[in-house]
């Protein structure tokens, strides 16, 4: 996504539900009261995810420590965020980090964690903030008791889902093909950053994507910087894997997106990429629904540097998962170099030395028009392309919907059998989002929750596949 960190921060500040703080008092101040709202946001066999919202009802605080007790010895914090987490027996503790010490009087903040459980009810009791008992709600939230995707998903009959119909994908010539060597065009949606909009990806929303939208794929956008993977590799890795499973249960493909944007040289994250892809490839090697996208939008860097990065990361994936398709980012924010004044010939003349790969192309319809479409038309005769991200608006993620340019783009991609994922399946306060602000918190993912962009994209994604 071609947006600044500041713009993203501003967007998520108006929409976000899980990113926050907990507290320990100033020397001159004491906790006079607090409220904790605890919500189980997802649950699966042997595990769960929870959000914790803390409101300070006393004087301003410059440090904090929150404690709570699980009802069952089998319930443990596995990975947490926005705090330093520990557990002794059934008592878990979350303590502030350096960057989130302060909490003003009346202010609220959010944090969360994933946990393991051997019981049916992972709701803790006895929340205390710096030793003071908090009031509030401790429950599973508006969805009542969360359940696993396997029990709540209405799965179409065998052979009807994209995954059941096509199985393990591979690159055939300039196209993507299924096990029967038939050309496949996958159409679906991209998540927003998991660190900001994780609450949008739950049983109800993913059911809607699979069953109402009839989407073929979910692109899992895992930011590396901007409060992403580098801040908590175990949690982000586990969350990506859980969404791969959710997509598989619903018969959708999953694109694992190593979402790099700033800095633009993917080699900056080379070691992180090797670590991450070694882990997810080993874990998901037996699955047929996984596609690896190894660099979201390289920018300010040569094609040679991108190619070098790809030729170091792809063998790491192949060592664990030799069959999966890998998608390689391209120069100029994955524009095949067009946004840098170049074009596809630099890739055609110097391709990545690897098999079963595709090349990324991104566009935003209000900003990228005829010259970009001409490049894609030419390049598609020589290179396997996948549009892993596109928007109906400008490259900032905002502005008015450009329906005519979006339609021209999607008509072209349909004609060329090029797969695509729209940015974004989220309720971000920006016109590129498919859902209206507040939809995720309200659990509403139906037609009434769709933005103008969401309605337009759904009308294209939900048309019948030709496979």
Image (cartoon, rainbow, N blue to C red):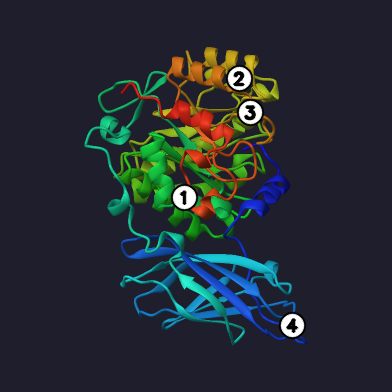
The Cα–Cα distance between marks 1 and 4, rounded to whole angstroms, is 37 Å
Residue that sits furthest to the front in the current view = 448
In what quadrant of the picture does the N terminus appear? top right
Query: What residue lies at 37% left-to-right and 61% top-to-bottom?
Result: 146
Residue identifier under label 4: 26
> Which residue was labeled with disc 3?
401
* Residue to which mark 1 is pinned: 201
For mark 3, give the secondary structure. Answer: loop
Question: For the point 68% across and 30% down, which residue is it?
Answer: 400
Q: Which mark sits nearer the N-terminus, 4 or 3?
A: 4
Relative image position of residue 188 (x, y in whole percent)? 45, 34
| Badge 3: residue crowd in 10 Å (few <14, some 14–19, many ≥20) | many
Residue 159 appears in which quarter of the rendering? Answer: top left
* Res. 37 visible in picture: yes
User: Label 1 crowding class (10 Å Cα cut-off): few <14, some 14-19, many 20+?
Assistant: many
**SS for callout 2:** helix
Across and down, in percent, residue 91 comes to 46, 82
At numbered mark 4, what does the secondary structure look like: helix, strand or loop? loop
Q: Nearer the viewer, mark 1 or mark 3?
A: 3
């Amino acid at each position: 996504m071609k947006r600044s960190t500041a713009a993203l921060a501003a967007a998520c500040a108006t929409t976000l539900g899980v990113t926050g703080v907990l507290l320990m008092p100033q020397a001159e101040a004491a906790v006079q009261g607090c409220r904790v709202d605890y919500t189980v946001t997802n649950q699966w066999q042997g595990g769960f995810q929870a959000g914790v919202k803390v409101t300070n009802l006393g004087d301003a605080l410059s440090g904090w420590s929150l404690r709570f007790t699980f009802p069952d010895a089998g319930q443990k914090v596995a990975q947490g965020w926005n705090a330093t987490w520990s557990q002794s027996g059934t008592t878990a503790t979350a303590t502030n980090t350096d960057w989130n010490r302060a909490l003003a009087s009346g202010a609220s903040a959010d944090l969360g964690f994933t946990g393991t459980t051997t019981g049916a009810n992972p709701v803790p009791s006895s929340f205390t903030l710096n030793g003071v008992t908090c009031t509030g709600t401790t429950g599973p939230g508006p969805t009542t008791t969360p359940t696993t995707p396997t029990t709540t998903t209405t799965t179409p009959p065998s052979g009807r889902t994209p995954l059941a119909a096509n199985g393990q994908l591979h690159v055939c010539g300039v196209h993507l093909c299924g096990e029967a060597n038939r050309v496949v065009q996958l159409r679906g949606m991209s998540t927003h950053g998991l660190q900001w909009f994780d609450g949008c990806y739950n049983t109800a929303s993913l059911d809607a994507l699979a069953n109402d939208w009839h989407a073929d794929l979910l692109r899992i956008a895992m930011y590396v910087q901007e409060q992403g993977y580098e801040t908590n590799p175990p949690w982000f890795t586990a969350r990506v894997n859980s969404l791969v499973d959710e997509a598989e249960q619903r018969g959708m493909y999953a694109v694992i997106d190593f979402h790099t944007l700033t800095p633009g040289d993917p080699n900056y994250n080379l070691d992180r990429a090797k670590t991450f892809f070694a882990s997810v490839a080993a874990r998901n090697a037996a699955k047929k629904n996984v596609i690896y996208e190894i660099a979201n939008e390289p920018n300010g860097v040569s094609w040679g540097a991108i190619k070098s990065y790809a030729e170091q990361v792809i063998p790491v994936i192949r060592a664990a998962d030799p069959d999966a398709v890998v998608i390689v980012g391209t120069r100029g924010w994955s524009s095949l170099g067009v946004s840098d004044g170049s074009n596809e010939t630099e890739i055609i003349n110097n391709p990545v030395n690897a098999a079963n790969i595709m090349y990324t192309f991104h566009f935003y319809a209000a900003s990228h028009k005829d010259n970009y479409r001409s490049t894609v038309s030419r390049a598609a005769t020589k290179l396997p392309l996948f549009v892993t991200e596109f928007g109906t608006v400008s490259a900032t993620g905002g502005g008015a919907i450009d329906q005519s340019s979006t339609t021209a783009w999607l008509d072209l991609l349909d004609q060329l059998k090029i797969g695509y994922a729209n940015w974004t399946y989220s309720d971000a306060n920006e016109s590129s989002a498919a859902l209206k602000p507040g939809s995720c918190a309200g659990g509403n993912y139906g037609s009434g929750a769709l933005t103008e962009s969401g309605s337009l994209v759904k009308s294209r994604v939900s048309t019948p596949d030709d496979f």
